Amino acid sequence: MRALRLMIVLITLVVLTLSAVVPALAQEQNPQQNPRDLFLFTRYPVQEATIGDPTTIRLTLGTDTTPQIVRLAVRGAPDGWDISFRGDGKVVQAVYVNPKNEASVDLRVEPPKDTAAGAYKMTVVASGETREATLPLELILKAEKETSAGLTLDVDLPTLRGSSGTTFRYNMTVKNESDQEVPVSLLAEAPRGFQVDFRFGGQSITSIPFGPNESKSLSVEVRPLPDTPAGTYDIQVLAQGGEYRATTTLAAELTGQPQLTLTTPDGRLSGEARIGEKTAIKLVVQNTGSAPARNIQLSASPPVGWTVEFEPQNIAELANGQTVEVTANIQPSNQAIAGDYVVTFSARPDEGASDSAEFRVTVLTSTLWGLVGVALIAIAVVGVGMAVMRFGRR
Amino acid sequence: MQQQPETLTLGRQREGSPWTGLWAVVAKEMADHLTSVRMLILEALIILTAAGTVYAASQSLRDGFGGDTFLFLKLFTTAREPLPAFVGFLGLLVPLLGIALAFDSVNGEFNQRTISKVLAQPIYRDALLFGKFLAGLGALALTLTSIWLLIVGMGLLRLGVPPTGEEVVRSLWFLLVTIFYGGVWLALAMLFSIVFRQPATAALASLAVWLFFTAFWGIIASLLANLLRPVPLGDPLALIDQVQLELALARISPNTLFTEVALATLNPTVRSLGLVLPIQLHNAVLGTPLPATQSMLLTWPHATGLIAATIVLFALGYVLFQRQEIRA
């Protein structure tokens, strides 16, 4: 029993010791398995490139044993290719490596523009103190793609809707896709009755410079003139820079709006009215807007105690550009005093803005009391005449 | 004397026109008035006042006070320290002129014993009284018109702009009302000269009436209105009633009538004389001038009152004069 317990403890100890030692052995074995004096590799040994564009390939150099200086060269490259090694932005010929640090070098390959498309092979040779490392590379050159244009126009919402009083504001992104600096001039072709304005950063512009691959957000402001009839209008926008050009079409859907004006036939906004008598005032309602006005209500705000009646009281429909004559019958209050009062007439359609006109009414008092005065004087004169008749002496 | 009972019977036909000799009387009386020292003094007084006040007013207007409309009307109403406006003077001087022209017109004839001589001519008493009254009114009108012309002429010289048609109509209307304002006092003084035998008594009585209306009637009207229409606390309607009554009472005085006419005629922006309720001013455009015809309509009752008072006072004097014994 006692021996059995000792056995178990011993076995446990042995197992524990072994489990601690085995991984340590495994770690020590790894470098010793494959010690290299010099190694050279790249992550992407086969690359594609466009003809005329330089290609950069990143190389990694290292050693496991001795620190050394490694000279670099390329073998098998076609003639006329411009090939250089760069390290930290400088053109280099050799690299120093030591076991702890791997070194990175860029291989820059610039095939001439007239190179034919196809696969080109070359080998990078790194010569160390004791041995050489080689790395075969393959560069597949492709013909330059015909990029559509150097400029693109992109509009977020190309169709907007609004009334004739509003400003249509389109957000447009212009991109210069070429790698050149291009001044771009902007043009717009709009139908009659529209004003187009290009705005950038709050300024009105006609041309704007673009750097390579730069894009800018512009806004195109389209203002219809007030009398432009309702309808859908297309606005052509053209951006032109160097030999590149781009066009797009903006659409403005113009909903009409009635615009009423209230005045008198001769434009005179004053008149006279006698106390206690109805006076007719002719008014003219005109629709100068771009859509018909419906159900126009006529109203007035006269002084207290006055009556104002319209004939007709409302107008069912008034087409744009049309006028209609309305008669307002005003009767001043019996309490009114002679002189000027203001009566405000207004015409209000169902949709659209109303218009009002201030009319100055000169109140004239009745001449009745004047006649009464004359009658009183006449009575006094008759009285004198009667006195003469009665008391006249020879 | 024997015929007096007959004259009182109705339906009696008189021989000849009562107007016979009227124009002779008017001409003689006018000549008397215009040459009398009394008239000269008064005319000189009024003309000096007119010249002084209007010169001062035009000086003010030239300096740019008073705006740029109705400049001629402002000649009458613009006051410049220490002188009051010409209209203020007129309110005092015109009654004085009227009284001075008539306070001895009838009793003076009696006192000089000339009345029987005059009536011995083929002239009726009617014509004599009419003629005296018309001559007085004519002298008054002549004086006032010449002053009006003087003012317009001075205005033309001093202001350098001609009066507008509106201004001419308004100032002529004001002239007419002023003549009848004087006419009231003329008729009153003539009435007193018939009633009282002493010219001094007639003059004093006239002046007493004038003083009464000028100085005391306003106070009395206010007291009477307070007495007749007491206002319970917080009753605006009763207050309006009282103010209306006070105004009506005050308008018995010819002075009030004349002042109101002057106000409304010479100031075109006055739209109403008397109480104006706020409700009547709703939406009203204030400060705009009334047309001249409307101002005339506004002051028409006042003018009617003055003209009617003149005629009634004359009629009263006429009746009294006809019933008087002349051959005393």
Image (cartoon, coloured by chain):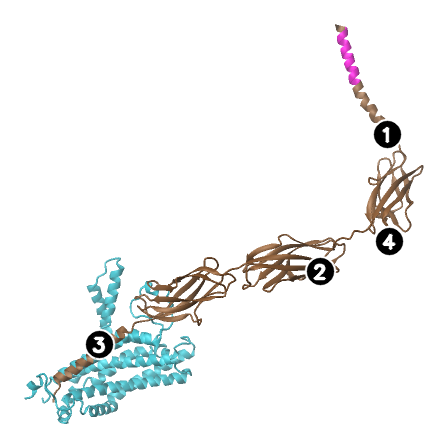
Q: Are marks 2 and 3 on the same chain?
A: yes
Please tell me the colour of chain B.
Answer: cyan
Residue occupying the point 38% across, 64% down: A310
Percent of width and height locating residue B201: 16, 82
Q: What crowding class fits label 2: few (fewer than 14 Cα within 10 Å), some (14-19), or many (20 or more)?
A: some
Q: Position of residue A12 (x, y in %)?
A: 77, 14
Q: Amino acid at mark 4?
A: Asp
- Label 3, secondary structure: give it: helix
Q: Which residues are magenta?
A: A3-17
Per the rendering, the mark at residue A31 is 1
Residue neighbourhood size for the residue with mark 4, other residues' Cα within 10 Å, grouped as few (<14), some (14–19), many (≥20): few
Left or right, residue B39 beside residue A282: left
Q: Label 4 is found on which chain of the structure?
A: A
Overall secondary structure of the magenta section: helix
Label 4: which secondary element: loop
Residue at mark 2 = A240
Is there one chain holding both mark 4 and mark 1?
A: yes
Q: Amino acid at mark 2?
A: Gln
Say which mark, if any, is on residue A114.
4
